Amino acid sequence: MTQTIFILNGPNLNLLGQRQPEIYGHETLHDVQAACAAQAKDLGLAIDFRQSNHEGEIVEMIHEARDKAAGIIINPAAYTHTSVAILDALSAFDGPVIEVHISNVHKRESFRQHSYVSLRADGVIAGLGTAGYSAALRHLAETLRQR
Ligand code: DQA
């Protein structure tokens, strides 16, 4: 059976391409979704790609992943730096979790340099632009193949 990867995106990422393009680039979230879908097909995986501006909705998506996903790629956006609830939800998920940031958060304001999600993530990718999603997907495909 084809394994599904949940790709979850936090607040303001619906504005990707319009929002601070000097930091986040010109690609839209729809472009990222299309690229991930094409890549997943080549890797023999399915994706469920979602975005929410609401913390509780993201928590519920992670709960849903417990039954439906083999792995999670998550860009929690600003909730990275604030959300114990998202950390706790991810801690209740058994599969591999990769945290992705489009920008290099370590080169930015000091409040972006702490991540609650990193306490659970198996890997963290930051600063590769939207190519970080593709690197995460490739890594998960490899990890899941080895299991
Ligand atoms: C982000 C970095 C976060 O600090 C920020 O709040 C975002 C996006 C990134 O992808 O670089 O919204 O997660």
Image: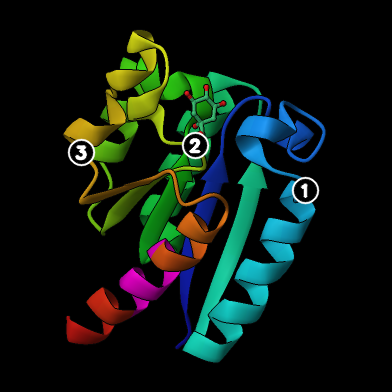
| Mark 1 sits near ligand 1, with its Cβ under 8 Å away | no
Q: Residues within 10 Å of mark 3 (few under 14, many from 20)?
A: many
Where disc 1 sits, the SS reads: loop
Among the two numbered marks 3 and 1 on one chain, the one whose residue lies closer to the N terminus: 1
* Residue for badge 3: 120
Q: Amino acid at mark 2?
A: Ser
Q: Residues within 10 Å of mark 1 (few under 14, many from 20)?
A: some
Real-space Cα separation, disc 3 to disc 2, in angstroms? 20 Å
Where disc 3 sits, the SS reads: loop
Vertical relation: 89 (above or below) 135: above
Which portion, as a residue range, is magenta? 136-141
Q: Between 100 and 62, which is closer to the camera in this rendering?
A: 100
Res 118 quadrant in image: top left
Q: Residue at x 37, y 26 (%)?
A: 107
62 sits left or right of 84 in the view: right
| Mark 2 sits near ligand 1, with its Cβ under 8 Å away | yes
Among the two numbered marks 2 and 1 on one chain, the one whose residue lies closer to the N terminus: 1
**Main SS category, magenta section:** helix
Q: Residue at x 48, y 47 (%)?
A: 64
* Residue for badge 1: 28
Vertical relation: 123 (above or below) 36: above
* Residue for badge 2: 103
